[in-house]
Amino acid sequence: MDDIQLGCGRTGSFFSFETAGIVPDIVCLSKSPAGTEYDVWKPDEHNDTFRGYNPAFVTRARALGLFWSDRALENRTTALGERVRRALTGTARRHGLAAPRGRGLGWGLPAGPHDEVAKVFPPLNVADEHVEQGLGMLDEAVASVVGGRTLAA
């Protein structure tokens, strides 16, 4: 199972496929919690999913142990995900787009004539005000692309 983009708590549960009852033979994971000053990327610097940096691996293992010692991160991700779902659903309705798809903090909003999708993947430790700010910016961007046309909510 490839859970690189949606694993490590991105959808609420640790693995994105848990709610489907899938039991894979092997799972590929990457990214998500690290939180070290060594795991910071400048613009255009990150270009490979399969990167490795031992101090980041060590801190990531420690962070996983802390973040998953209780259900606080899972509950927060689920609650924030519901806020994201509501906001993206409103954006889609106002601008005549298909409904968003996703769960937790991993969402897609149809964004083009050839089934392109704008990914909405805020970090798991995102501040509440940044979620609201980002969703507002996305709504404004969609409005500017569709020429300001809106539909009744």
Image (cartoon, grey):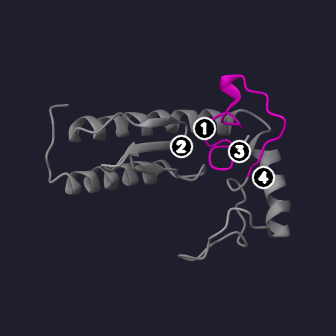
Q: Are marks 4 and 3 in contact (CB under 8 Å)?
A: no
- 12 magenta-colored: yes
- Residues marked 4 and 1 touching at CB (< 8 Å): no
Q: Is residue 100 above or below residue 31?
A: above
Question: Label 4 sits on what residue type?
Answer: Ala
The CA span between labels 4 and 3 is 21 Å
For the residues marked 2 and 1, what is the alpha-carbon distance in whole angstroms? 6 Å
Query: Closest to the observer: 112 or 127?
Result: 112
- What's under tag 2, amino acid-wise? Gly
The answer to whether the residue labelled 2 contacts the one labelled 4, judged by CB atoms less than 8 Å apart, is no
Looking at the rendered structure, which numbered label has been put on residue 34?
none
User: Above or below — where is 64 with respect to 57?
Assistant: above
Camera-side mark, 2 or 3: 3
Task: Tell whether position 51 is magenta.
Answer: no
Q: Amino acid at mark 1?
A: Thr
Task: Indicate which disc residue 106 carries.
Answer: 2
Q: Find the distance from the CA under tag 2 to the CA under tag 4.
A: 20 Å
- For mark 1, give the secondary structure: loop
Name the kind of residue labelled 3 in the image. Answer: Asp
Looking at the figure, which quarter contains the C terminus? top left
Q: Upstream in the sequence, badge 2 or badge 1?
A: 1
Q: Position of residue 147 (x, y in %)?
A: 15, 54
Secondary structure category for the residue under label 2: strand
- From the top left corner, tell me how far across and down residue 58 is, in percent: 86, 61
Q: Which residue is found at the position 62% from the left and 43% from the top? A: 10
Point out the frontmost of discs 4 and 3.
3
**Residue receiving disc 1:** 11
Residue range in magenta is 3-29
Checking the image for residue 63, the label placed there is 4
All told, the count of numbered labels is: 4
Disc 3 marks which residue? Answer: 2
